[in-house]
Amino acid sequence: MTKQEFVKQERYLKLNDEGDFIIDYDGKLDIIDFHTHMSNVLPLKVVDPNTKGNKVAYKTLPPIEKMDLSVPYWTKIDVNEKRKGIWSVIKFSLDGYSIFKDMANGGTYENCFRSQQENSIKHNVVLPLSTKKSDRSMEALKLAKEFPERFTAFCSVHPQDPQMEEKIKRYKKLGFKGLKLKISDMELKDDFEPLIQLLKACYSVDFTVLLHTGSLTHIKQENTSNTMWKLIKSTRVELFGDLLKHLPHDFKFVFGHSGIAEYQLVAKYMKAFPGSYAELSCQSADSIRYLMEEVGYERLIFGSDWPALPQAITLSRVLIATEHDDEARNHMLYKNAKKLLGL
Ligand SMILES: [Zn+2]
């Protein structure tokens, strides 16, 4: 099947003249995208966002013959998928690196503004990704200072950063609206105390916190090696959901990607923790409907993970899930985000 044939079967999606997915919708929308990155906020060599002529390849997307938008992560599920041997682990790391490279190459102003325009997106929340060694927060702030109409900046501070507490206080004063982190139990060596301290510091300055959460649940342990299994499970929802017990009930926590394949578990945590939200990037229309039924639309937020993924696909899933419910649609596309960001 060609990409053109693929979008013909999908409501609210079409291709632009570059062959990228864009939204096919006539009405007016003023959307806030709660999960985006840019070329200068990743844990790689900083690429100047003013660079012209770079293209985004969207390497996180599966090839069209493997694409299935009816499941989270949009990749056809093979229940017998095998990830055995050292090669799987190497491929996993290489894929991760190549995705970051593509995001750093393509996350420029030129591509971002075009994508915003083609998808009726007014505002991107930019999430930097810091490691213990490099803090990319100030790069995100630069974008928000240069284009305050288009960007809001989150900071990213590693839990083992020796200046963690001072940084959180300073970043609050500088105008950041929250904190983003992608971290795993492997990186933390199963010691979650520094992360709990970081979350508490965020609570004390009223930062919203978005963590990358979720794993691919269809892969079976017997079809993996020990290392691969650890890697797959290293950002699973329960690791982060359980930490919410250590925080006040009104702590504003966002489950990034709604836990990918673990969205049902995310709904459970959301029922237990009323201050928590789910950000919808890479979900399907069905999983979004499931979340709406379980926790209501007032704690679900549209995010795309651009430029890892096109803004249009998650957006089209939200439009399908809210087809006869404008109130739910407007809440998920911007009202909930506005409230969280205090805009
Ligand atoms: Zn992301």
Image (cartoon, rainbow, N blue to C red):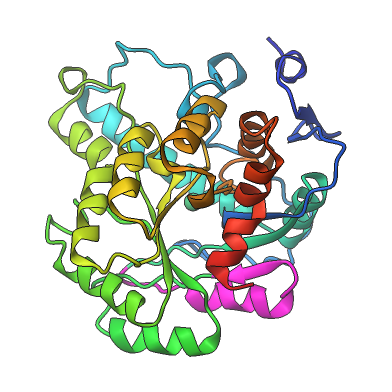
Please tell me whether residue 214 is drawn above or below residue 47 in the rendered image: above
Please provide the residue range marked out in magenta. Answer: 132-153
Task: Based on the picture, tell me whether residue 151 belongs to the magenta stretch.
Answer: yes
Task: Judge by depth and name the residue closer to the eye, 196 or 17.
Answer: 196
Residue at x 85% of width, y 41% of height: 27
Residue 65: which quarter of the image?
top right
**Quarter of the rendering occupied by the N terminus:** top right
Q: Position of residue 100 (x, y in %)?
A: 50, 50
Residue 169: which quarter of the image?
bottom left
Please tell me whether residue 151 is drawn above or below residue 84 in the rendered image: below
- In this view of the protein, can residue 180 be seen by the observer? no
Residue 146: which quarter of the image?
bottom right
**Quarter of the rendering occupied by the C terminus:** bottom right
Q: Position of residue 29 (x, y in %)?
A: 79, 49
Q: Is residue 314 left or right of residue 217?
A: right
Please tell me whether residue 109 is drawn above or below residue 27 in the rendered image: below
- In this view of the protein, can residue 70 be seen by the observer? yes
Task: Judge by depth and name the residue closer to the eye, 223 or 269.
Answer: 269
